[in-house]
Image: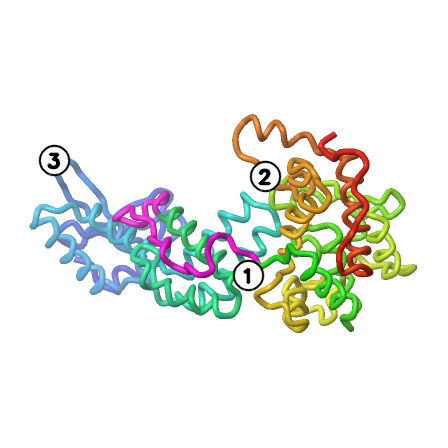
Amino acid sequence: MLTELTIKALKPRDKLYRVADREGLCLEVTPTGSKLWRYRYRYAGKARMMALGKWDEITLLDARDRLRDARRLLANGMDPMASKRAATAAQVKEGRVAFPAFAAEWLEYKRKRVGIETYRKARLVTEGDLIPSLRRHSIDTLATKDVTPVLDKIAQRAPNLAVKARQYLGGMVAYAIQQGLREDGKLLSLRGTLVKYDAGHIPAITKPAELRPLLLAIDGYSQQVTRTALLLASLTALRPSVIASAQWAHIDLEAGEWHIPGHLMKTRHDHIVPLPRQAVTLLEAIRGNDPGQYVFPSPAKQKTPHLHRDALSKALREMGFQGKHATHGFRGTLRTMARERLSVDIDVLEAQLAHAKKGDVQKAYDRTTFDDQRREVMQAWADYLDNLRKDPAGKVVAIKRKASG
C-alpha cells in the first residue's frame, strides 16, 4: 500500500506508469511529473478506469474515501463513472438554470439574432428589472405565480416595458425548453397577466383637436435637445430608439434623406427616410460647424453616449401627456391621421413605418419602398402639422397625386 512518503518519492519516467494502493486504487505518474488518482474496476464485464483527482489536491486518505464511495455504488449495481458524470451534469445544470445565469445566456443568444436596438431594449429590461427581481429563481421551475408580481411592478412604472418584459420571459422559457432545461416542457401561461395593458396598447393621439395641444406643448418645451428629438419623432414617425440614437453620418441634409442601417432597425433591413423641409431645418439648427457622432448627444453621458429614449417619455409626462401619448405613439398618429386626413394609401404608410410583413408574397412586396410617394406624403404630413398649429380646425390642402401611385 502507498504512504504519503512513498508517493512523494515517486519520480517521473519516460513513460506513464501506475503504482497500486489497494482494491483497484492506484496512483498514475506522468512523464511531466503529474500524479493522478485512478480507480480500476470492472462493470458489465468490461474494464474501466475512473479519475478520482490530482494527488496535490486529493490526499491519500481522501482518495481512499472516494474509493469506498465508488465501491459502494458498484456493490449496488451502479457504474461509478456513469454516476459521477450524471452528478457533474446535474451540478452544471443547476448553475445554468439559475435565473441570472440563464438570463445572461438568453441575452447572448438573442444578441446574435436581432438588431442592436432590439437587443439593447431586451438587455435593459432583463438586467434592470427581471434579473434583480427573479435572482432567487431557476428557469427550470419558473412559474406564472413567480413572474406576475414582477410584471405588475414594472407596469406601475412603465406599462409598455412590462409588456416587453412578459414577451422576454416567454422567450426565455421557450429557449429553456429548446435546451432541455425544463423537464415538464411547459411554456409560461402569461395570457392573463397585464390584461389592462394588453392589446399592444401604446397611447397615441389621433384627433386633430388633441394633437394640436401636444404639438404646441412640444414647441414650448425648454430643453432644446429633447424638444428637437420629439419634433423629429412627430415629423418622421420613427421608433424612439432610432430617434434618440440618430447619427449625423446617416443623415444627408442636402438630399433630405436619413439612411438608417439595417442593424439599427427592428426589421434588420436598411431604411431610407425622406426628410421634409421642416425636419431639415430642425437638424440644421442644431448641427453646428463641428458636430459629434450623435445628433442628440447625452447631456450627462451616463447610460448611453446619446440621448436616452426615456428622456423623451419623461418630457411627455412633464407636459401632462402620460397615458395619453407616448413617443412611440407618433407612429400610430401618422398611420391613423395620414389615412383619415390626407387619404394616404396604407401600403405607403407601412413602408414609411418599416413594418415587417408576414407571408412569402408580402415579404416580396416589402421590396417596394414607395420612395417617391413617401417623400410626397411626409412633406404633406409636415405641412399638415404646421397648419394644425395655426388652425384648430386642422384644415389642409390634400395631396394632389394619389399616394398609392
Q: Earlier in the sequence, mark 3 or mark 2?
A: 3
Task: Tell me if I can see residue 19 in this picture.
Answer: no
Q: Secondary structure at mark 2?
A: loop
List the residue tagged with mark 1: 124
In the image, taking residue 160 as reference, residue 29 lies left or right, namely: left
Numbered range of the magenta stretch: 177-202
> Which label belongs to residue 75?
none
Q: Amino acid at mark 3?
A: Gly
Left/right placement of residue 231 relative to residue 240 reads right
Report which residue position mark 3 lands on. 45
Mark 1 surroundings: few (<14), some (14-19) or many (≥20) residues within 10 A: some
Q: Residue furthest right?
A: 289
Provide the major secondary structure of the magenta segment.
Answer: loop
Which residue position holds label 2? 356
Look at the picture and state if 215 lies above or below 340.
Answer: below
Sort mark 2 into few (<14), some (14-19) or many (20+) by Cα contacts within 10 Å.
some
| Mark sitting earlier along the chain (3/1) | 3
